[in-house]
Amino acid sequence: MEMRPRISQEEFDLIKGHRALKQECEATGIPLDSVNYYWYKSEKFSINAKNKQKSYLDVRDEVIKEMKSYAPVYKTIAHNTNDEGTLLVVDPADIHIGKLCSSFETGNDYNNQIAVKRVMDGVHGILNKSMGFNTDMILLIIGNDILHVDGAKNSTTSGTTMDTDGMWYDNFLIAKKLYIQVIETLTQVANVHVQYNPSNHDYVNGFLLADSLSSWFHKCANVTFDVSISHRKYFKYHRNLIGTTHGDGAKINDLALLMAHEASAYWHESKHRYMYYHHIHHKVSKDYMSVCVESLRSPSGTDSWHHRNGYQHAPKAIEGYIHDKEHGQIARLTNLF
């Protein structure tokens, strides 16, 4: 086999019409005149056509552009707002789509079907409990280990092998469909701001899922998104400053001071400050001077690892909060399973 590093104009003209080269270029989307190398043996050609490599951002932008062209058109819903309205925070935390728990070992079952049902039951339960609070805005927190694994090897982003239910691509689509259903449900009540927190189980696929959701609702005027890869995000609602993070990174004791630095533009405009974190699957709430730092419970079941280490008896729940414009968090809403 002979390899030639560059195709001369004469040689290129000889093989330009060759079917193998043409088919290779058509299959890869590379222009015929951009071929840099080729390999051949006798009369049988094996073509290796190379072109300028695309960056991740190039591919990402193309995918987003294509998805936006197919985004469904949602009819804008006119919601009433007034001075007595409140913010509803809906935070389905640590859902772990793809997680597999067996009652034979741990005392409870958990799979994709149970996960989806609990989230939807929990969201409807939070909405029912919020009736009478005159909700005029909803903050939906997504991410936070929505997916149990991060790729085809059934492991977390760092490589820890997990017991799983279903294939990774099926779980991605299940999570996407679930979030779409949740957002469509919430927009019937009020305008929704979706805030994404990257997490340790699904750092890559969780971000891609959040990004695809923002494209899906691109033509929906009732939904806004903050789906950057930033590990801590902040949302201002009148005198409330609300931060969210997964909880696997910065120390919990540092979250209040981080808020003061990272959300300094809103710090002096707010009177009531909250940092909601996830990851630990149980309830902790503590005031750090003017910032209340509080963790969220999870609806996910107990798998083999958690059972073996005794991390299993915290209540399973979907949680939410009511924030008054002037008085801050005035209610916790819990839907237990």
Image (spheres, grey):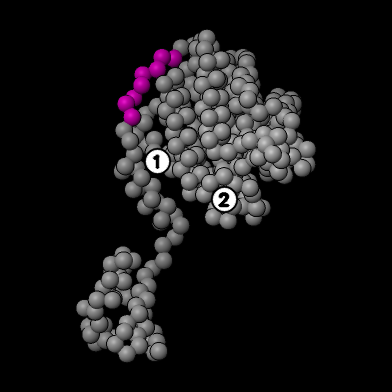
Q: Which mark is residue 337?
A: none
Instruction: Look at label 2 and name its amino acid.
Output: Asp
Above or below, comparing residue 33 to residue 87 in the picture: below
Q: Residues within 10 Å of mark 1 (few under 14, many from 20)?
A: many
Q: Position of residue 61 (x, y in %)?
A: 39, 51
**Residue 164 in sight from this viewpoint:** yes
Of tags 1 and 2, the one toward the viewer is 2
Q: Outermost residue, front direction?
A: 104
- Quadrant of the rendering where the N terminus is positioned: bottom left
Tell me: 133 left or right of 214: right
Instruction: Look at label 1 and name its amino acid.
Output: Ser
Please tell me in which quadrant of the rendered image residue 198 appears: top right
Above or below, comparing residue 269 to residue 36 in the picture: above
Q: Position of residue 38 (x, y in %)?
A: 35, 81
The secondary structure type at the circle numbered 1 is helix
Q: Is residue 79 magenta?
A: yes
Q: Is residue 273 magenta?
A: no
The mark nearer the N terminus, 1 or 2, is: 2
Above or below, comparing residue 171 to residue 83 in the picture: below
- Quadrant of the rendering where the C terminus is positioned: top right
The residue carrying mark 1 is: 215
Give the magenta range. 74-81
Please report contact status of discs 1 and 2: CB closer than 8 Å, yes or no: no
Q: Between marks 1 and 2, how big is the CA–CA gap?
A: 21 Å
Predominant SS along the magenta part: loop
Residue at the spot 51% in from the left edge and 21% down from the top edge: 124
Q: Position of residue 205 (x, y in %)?
A: 52, 48
The residue carrying mark 2 is: 150
Residue at the spot 52% in from the left edge and 12% down from the top edge: 131
Residue at the spot 52% in from the left edge and 49% down from the top edge: 168
Please tell me in which quadrant of the rendered image residue 119 appears: top right
